[in-house]
Amino acid sequence: MTTYLITGSRPYGGDATDILIADGRITAVGDSLSAPGAEVVDAAGLIALPGLVDLHTHLREPGREDAETVETGSRAAALGGFTAVHAMANTDPVADTAGVVEQVWRLGEQAGLVDVVPVGAVTVGLRGERLAELGAMADSAARVRVFSDDGLCVSDPALMRRALEYVKAFDGVVAQHAEEPRLTAGAQMHEGDRSARLGLTGWPAAAEEAIIARDVLLAGHVGARLHVCHVSTAGSVELLRWAKARGVQVTAEVTPHHLLLTDACAESYDPVFKVNPPLRTDEDVAALRQGLADGTIDAVATDHAPHAVEDKESEWAQARPGMLGLEQALSVVVETMVETGLLDWAGVADRMSVRPAAIGRLAGHGRPLAVGEPANLLLLDPAHRAPVDPAALASRSRNSPYAGRELPGRVVATFLRGTPTVLDGKATR
C-alpha cells in the first residue's frame, strides 16, 4: 500500500500541518514531516476533515440501474468527500431480506470507492403490513443496523412500536419517513399561500409533525432508538428539541436542499424542484439551520435521489420527487452554515461525519484526524467557487436542483482507509 504525505493542510480549519498516511492509517501529524518514498500531496490552503458519512442515499440498484448504480453512486459520493453511504431500501426487489442487503453490500465492496452500508426495509415490500426480516438482515454479512421504509411512512402505530421493540435487541435504529399519508394525498408542494396561488395540492407541515410527535412518544415508551429522516419544518425542530429534553433516544437529519432552497422554487414549475418532503418556507429554512447549529438536528444527509430523464422531464404533477445531492452536499453546507457563521469546520465534521457514523454504528468512520486512526479523510478547497454543471456529475442522472448555481468549495481529495478514491478533484477509478 502506497504511503502518502499530505503537506500543509489545515485540519478542521486550524493551523497548517502535515499528515502521514501508511498502511491505511494516520501514522503521524506534525510540522515538516518527511517520509522517503512517500507520494506527496500538496494541500496548502486546503481544509482536512474526516471522511463524510451519508445516512440517506438512494443508489437504485437493484432494479433502476438506468437512474443509478452502486458504482456510479459510489463515485459521486467519493467526489463529494464521502467515505461511507447508507443505501436506502426502496430498490426492486426491496431490500427486505438478508439476500438483497448482502447483494447491495457486495456491490459496494466491488466498487471499492466508499463503504456502502445497506439500509433494511422495516416492512415486507415497504407495504406497511408486517415486519421484514429485521433480525436476519442484522445478522447478515451486511450487518444492517438502520431500517427504513423511506419513501413511505410506517404509518401504523402498532407496527411502528413493534419495529422499535425489535431493533432494540441488537442496537438498531428505525429511520422514519415522517408523513401522515392521509394528510398528503395528491400533494405536490408545501401547503401555503404559494401552493394555493399556483394551483398545486399542498403538503401540510402538520403531516410531518404529527408522525414525529407520535414516534418520539413511542420511542420513549419502548426505550429504543428513533431516527427522523429529512426534517423539513420549524415545528419538527421544536418537537425534536422537546423530545431530546425529555431524554428520548431520537436523532434527526436535514438535507442540503432543505437548508438552501424554499418553496419559491416551485414558481418555475420545473420538476427538478419537486421533492418529498417538499421545499418549505424561509422561516422553516431558518429554523432548520438553527436546529442544525445547536445540535437539535444531528446530521446532514443528502437524500440523494437520482431519476431517469423520463421520470423528471414531464409535467410537475407526473414527475417523480427527488434531487441529486452527493457531490454538492458539502458545498451547500459551507454556504448555508459556515459562511453564515452558524458552524465552524469542527461543527461540519461533527454533523457530516462524527454523528452520522455514530447513528449508523459505523466503526472506523467519523474518527478524529489523529495518529492511529483510520485514514478516512477529505481535502477541501474552501476558496473555490464554480457553477454546478449537471452534465459533469458522476451520477447517471442529471436532476440537480443546483444547476447553474455557483457554490463554494471543491473536494480535491478523498481517502478511504489510506487509498485515494479522489485526487486532484477527479475519481481515481
Image: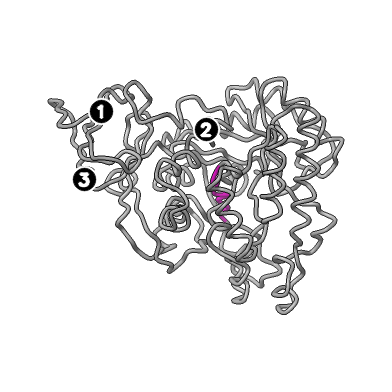
Q: Is residue 94 visible?
A: no
Quadrant housing residue 188: bottom right
Q: Disc 2 vs disc 1: which is toward the camera?
A: 1
Of the residues shown, which amino acid type is indicated by label 3?
Answer: Ala
Of the residues shown, which amino acid type is indicated by label 1?
Answer: Val
Name which of mark 1 and mark 3 comes first in the sequence.
1
Percent from the top left, x then y, of residue 90? 67, 44
Q: Is residue 90 left or right of residue 295?
A: right
Q: Quadrant of the C terminus?
A: top left
Numbered tag placed on residue 44 in the rendering: 3
Q: Is residue 388 left or right of residue 94?
A: left
Mark 1 = which residue?
29
Q: Quadrant of the N terminus?
A: top left
Q: CA distance from mark 1 to mark 3?
A: 15 Å
Secondary structure under the numbered disc 3 in the rendered image: loop
Percent from the top left, x then y, of residue 178? 73, 48
Of the residues shown, which amino acid type is indicated by label 2?
Answer: Ala
Q: CA distance from mark 2 to mark 3?
A: 28 Å
Task: Name the residue located 66 percent from the left edge and 73 percent from the top edge.
Answer: 315
Mark 2 = which residue?
357
Name which of mark 2 and mark 3 comes first in the sequence.
3
**Magenta span contains residue 198:** no
Task: Name the residue located 76 percent from the left edge and 40 percent from the top edge.
Answer: 125
Residue 182 sits above or below residue 248 on the image: below
Residue 357 sits above or below residue 183 on the image: above
- Which colour scheme appears in the figure? one colour
Quadrant housing residue 126: top right
Span of residues in magenta: 299-306
Secondary structure under the numbered disc 2 in the rendered image: helix
